[in-house]
Image (cartoon, coloured by chain):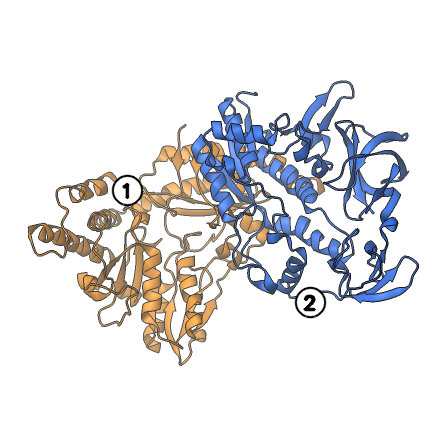
Chain colours: A orange, B blue
């Protein structure tokens, strides 16, 4: 079966050049990067080269980059590492569960958490951030780009508010990295999370930017790796891959590839809206990362649509998967003001660096007939067309 | 069997539905495995005495894991679909309400009617499968003579699940396969072994899927507490069949017709719950002889083998799952009501249960006992 993958916000394929960069580190260059002998020296060099590449992508210095196992660890490390018992934390209702749960977990440590709402376009209002500040506020954690809608958040404004208030600012940039330029100085954040498998590096890799001078309590205790911020023998092949992926991302952004990506996404979006009735873009009108389109198709179950499309070879997604694998209604869409039904009718398309025009054609070929088939079977749709 | 047709198999993680999936796949059909996520087992964990962790219940993580592994093993696409809202609305809530009204509900029939053969069938069609197959022990066949789809008892009567399937419509039956209908349970397990399914020896689940351990009273307490509601006060009097008040009870949902234990009164001879009156919160108790009745009325009737009941019909009738079908005559007694008159008095006819009518092995239809 011909398969087209449009679920890159869930994960991305490892690019050939990234895999090539990793290869030597599976076999010939296998040393523990902390060993003092030749084998350790050569992998240490590779790790530090990768660190430079990530620093370049984020606009920071190499010493401010901590390698992690991914976005979830990065969010947890930042959030639990920057606060103390009794602190107040401000976050948003659209954060990824990794950040959201890391914040609510803090409540068990006597911390208070304010969860800010978003508007109908999935945007946090910086004014709300300012108004939520208290004398006990220690940390603001607001993501840079939302994973479900792709909507970009006003992180630079929030950074300014944090600076004025003398409060720390962490941003989960997992869905922004590689899609839009990131400059941690411009943003004004003290910590920033990225994840390797969202930028064409393997799963199980990632990095956390920690601004120089910021005290971070580590989650792991052990060796002195990553300047004691994240002990554990380095995943050399993974880190090398992350570094290469970062290089590829930086070069792509410099070339303006993100505009080409946006054009493909826009063609998909426009095509769907033109050929499928009662379809709407969630987050329409807000600035988004160039690869994401979250579209709701009224009067159908998004879950059934995702399955029907999968059986025809097109991979997309909706909501978040729970531990049984069933889909739960998206807390992000509900936070934006969508009704439960509307949230359940929405699916997310997300492009990757490997996506080609033919993939868009394939999706545009499938969507209208599949949605029509579902609507024909949907009691809600029939009821509503009869009454109109 | 029906090559090139796509069939969705409702997989519970049990040996029956897993074997069905393996069978159909081996016969060359396009098979898709589906599990419905119906109830979050962790939702009431720890409340009001409910167990902290739940295993081995339908739709528990272990069961989904088992179903998924079978799907992976036999090489079919597998999806878990979320129908929690609907299940709560159409099965759990009525379950609680029925008990609080003094009736004994059958959630499995409601689940079949509203979820398994309604919602799941819809999902199957939406994803391109015209029919579903389940691991139920039952048989379905088209009868040319009457031009109707028939539901019949299976070969293994000890596993007969037709009692819970009386609500199926012609449309639903036309789209359903019961591949295990001609097999016995031991044969199914053997077939599972032949297909190399590790869960061939997995024990059957006997209880209500959302009530771990079978303690429905604890479930009702926990559910209402979670909803922020107090258990309604249905405490009242224990009354004899002649109207004499002999004691008190703490809530009508603690009782079911025919119950002997938990009455809290001791008399010379055994006392049983004869009737529960939701309206005045009375539990009427009496001797064994009061438990017998020759008639019952069934409402919200669904007829399967016939389109309508215009004349009285001789059938056999089950009044609960574990009951030997008893000879009776059924006849229309109202707009949506059937009167059942048994040849012999039957014990503990329970409002809320179903009366299912059989013509030999054919399910004539059924209704809810009022």
Residue A153 appears at what percent x and percent y?
39, 60
In this rendering, would A160 be left or right of A66? right
Dot 2: element: loop
The residue at the far right in this view is B242
The residue at the far left in this view is A38
The label number, if any, that marks residue A14 in the structure image? 1
In this rendering, would A302 be left or right of B215? left
Q: Quadrant of residue B308?
A: top right
Chain of the residue under the numbered disc 1 shown in the image: A
The residue drawn where x is 61% and y is 51% is B210
The residue drawn where x is 86% and y is 65% is B246
**Picture layout, residue B350 above or below residue B329:** below
Q: Tally the numbered discs.
A: 2
Residue A172 appears at what percent x and percent y?
35, 60
Query: In the image shown, does A4 or B49 lie closer to the viewer?
Result: B49
The label number, if any, that marks residue B230 in the structure image? 2
**Between tags 2 and 1, which lies in front?**
2
The residue at the far top in this view is B145
The quadrant of the rendering that contains the N terminus of chain A is: top left
Whether tag 2 and tag 1 are in contact, CB under 8 A, the answer is no
Asked whether residue A3 appears in the rendered view, the answer is yes
Residue A355 appears at what percent x and percent y?
34, 38
Give the spatial CA distance, label 2 vs label 1. Answer: 55 Å
Chain of the residue under the numbered disc 2 shown in the image: B
The residue drawn where x is 45% and y is 59% is A94
Asked whether residue A173 appears in the rendered view, the answer is no
**Picture layout, residue A328 above or below residue B123:** below
In this rendering, would B101 be left or right of A326? right
Q: Quadrant of residue A174?
A: bottom left
């Amino acid at each position: 079966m011909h398969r087209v993958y449009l679920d890159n916000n869930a994960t991305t394929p490892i690019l050939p050049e990234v895999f090539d960069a990793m290869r030597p580190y599976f076999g010939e260059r296998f040393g523990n990067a902390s060993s003092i002998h030749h084998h350790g020296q050569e992998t240490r060099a590779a790790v530090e080269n990768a660190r430079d590449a990530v620093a370049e992508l984020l606009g920071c210095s190499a010493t401010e980059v901590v390698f992690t196992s991914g976005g979830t660890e990065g969010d947890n490390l930042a959030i639990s590492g920057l606060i103390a018992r009794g602190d107040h934390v401000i976050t948003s209702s659209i954060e990824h569960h990794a950040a959201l749960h890391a914040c609510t977990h803090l409540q068990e440590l006597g911390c208070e958490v304010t969860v800010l709402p978003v508007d109908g376009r999935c945007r946090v209002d910086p004014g709300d951030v300012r108004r939520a500040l208290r004398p006990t506020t220690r940390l603001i954690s607001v993501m840079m780009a939302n994973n479900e809608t792709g909507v970009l958040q006003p992180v630079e404004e929030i950074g300014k508010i944090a600076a004025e208030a003398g409060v720390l600012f962490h941003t989960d940039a997992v869905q922004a990295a590689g899609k839009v330029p990131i400059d941690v100085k411009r943003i004004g954040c003290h910590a920033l999370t990225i994840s390797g498998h969202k930028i064409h590096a393997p799963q199980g890799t990632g990095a956390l930017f920690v601004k120089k001078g910021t005290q971070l309590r580590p989650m792991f205790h052990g060796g002195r790796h990553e300047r004691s911020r994240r002990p554990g023998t380095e995943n050399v092949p993974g880190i090398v891959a992350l570094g290469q992926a970062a290089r590829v991302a930086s070069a792509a952004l410099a070339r303006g590839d993100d505009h080409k990506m946006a054009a493909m996404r826009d063609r998909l979006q426009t095509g769907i809206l033109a050929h499928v009735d009662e379809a709407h873009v969630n987050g329409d009108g807000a600035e988004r990362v160039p690869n994401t389109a979250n579209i709701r198709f009224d009067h159908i179950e998004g879950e059934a649509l995702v399955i029907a499309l999968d059986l025809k070879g097109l991979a997309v997604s909706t909501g978040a998967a729970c531990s049984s694998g069933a889909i739960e209604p998206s807390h992000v869409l509900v936070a934006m003001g969508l009704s439960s039904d509307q949230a359940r009718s929405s699916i997310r398309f997300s492009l990757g660096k490997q996506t080609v025009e033919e993939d868009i054609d394939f999706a545009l070929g499938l969507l209208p007939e599949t949605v029509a088939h579902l609507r024909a079977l949907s009691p809600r749709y029939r009821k509503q067309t009869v009454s109109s | 069997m029906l090559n090139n047709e796509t069939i969705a198999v409702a997989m519970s993680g049990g040996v029956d539905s897993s074997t069905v999936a393996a069978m159909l796949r081996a016969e060359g059909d396009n098979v898709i495995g589906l599990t419905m996520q119906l109830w979050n087992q962790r939702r009431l964990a720890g409340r009001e005495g409910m167990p902290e962790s739940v295993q081995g219940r339908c739709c528990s993580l272990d069961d989904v894991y088992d179903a998924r592994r079978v799907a992976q093993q036999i090489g079919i696409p597998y999806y878990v679909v979320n129908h929690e809202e609907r299940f709560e609305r159409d099965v759990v809530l009525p379950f609680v309400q029925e008990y609080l009204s003094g009736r004994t509900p059958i959630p499995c029939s409601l689940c079949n009617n509203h979820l398994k053969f309604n919602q799941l069938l819809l999902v199957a069609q939406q994803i391109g499968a015209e029919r579903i197959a389940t691991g139920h022990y039952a048989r379905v066949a088209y009868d040319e003579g009457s031009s109707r789809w028939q539901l019949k008892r299976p070969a293994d009567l000890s596993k007969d699940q037709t009692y819970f399937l009386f609500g199926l419509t012609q449309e639903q039956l036309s789209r359903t396969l019961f591949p295990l209908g001609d097999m016995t349970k031991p044969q199914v397990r053997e077939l599972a072994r032949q297909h190399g399914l590790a869960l061939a020896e997995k024990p059957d689940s006997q209880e209500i899927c959302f009530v771990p351990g079978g303690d429905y009273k604890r479930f009702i307490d926990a559910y209402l507490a979670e909803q922020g509601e107090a258990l309604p006060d249905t405490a009242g009097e224990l009354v004899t069949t002649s109207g004499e008040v002999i004691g008190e009870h703490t809530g009508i949902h603690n009782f079911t017709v025919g119950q002997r234990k938990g009455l809290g009164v001791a008399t010379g001879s055994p006392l049983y719950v004869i009737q529960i009156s939701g309206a005045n919160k009375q539990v009427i108790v009496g001797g064994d002889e009061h438990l017998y009745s020759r008639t019952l009325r069934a409402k919200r009737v669904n007829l399967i083998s016939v389109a309508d009941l215009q004349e009285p019909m001789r059938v056999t009738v089950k009044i609960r799952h574990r009951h030997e079908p008893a000879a009776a005559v059924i006849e229309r007694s109202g707009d949506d009501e059937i009167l059942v008159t048994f040849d012999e008095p039957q014990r503990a006819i329970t409002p809320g249960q179903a009366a299912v009518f059989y013509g030999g092995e054919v399910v004539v239809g059924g209704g809810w006992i009022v």
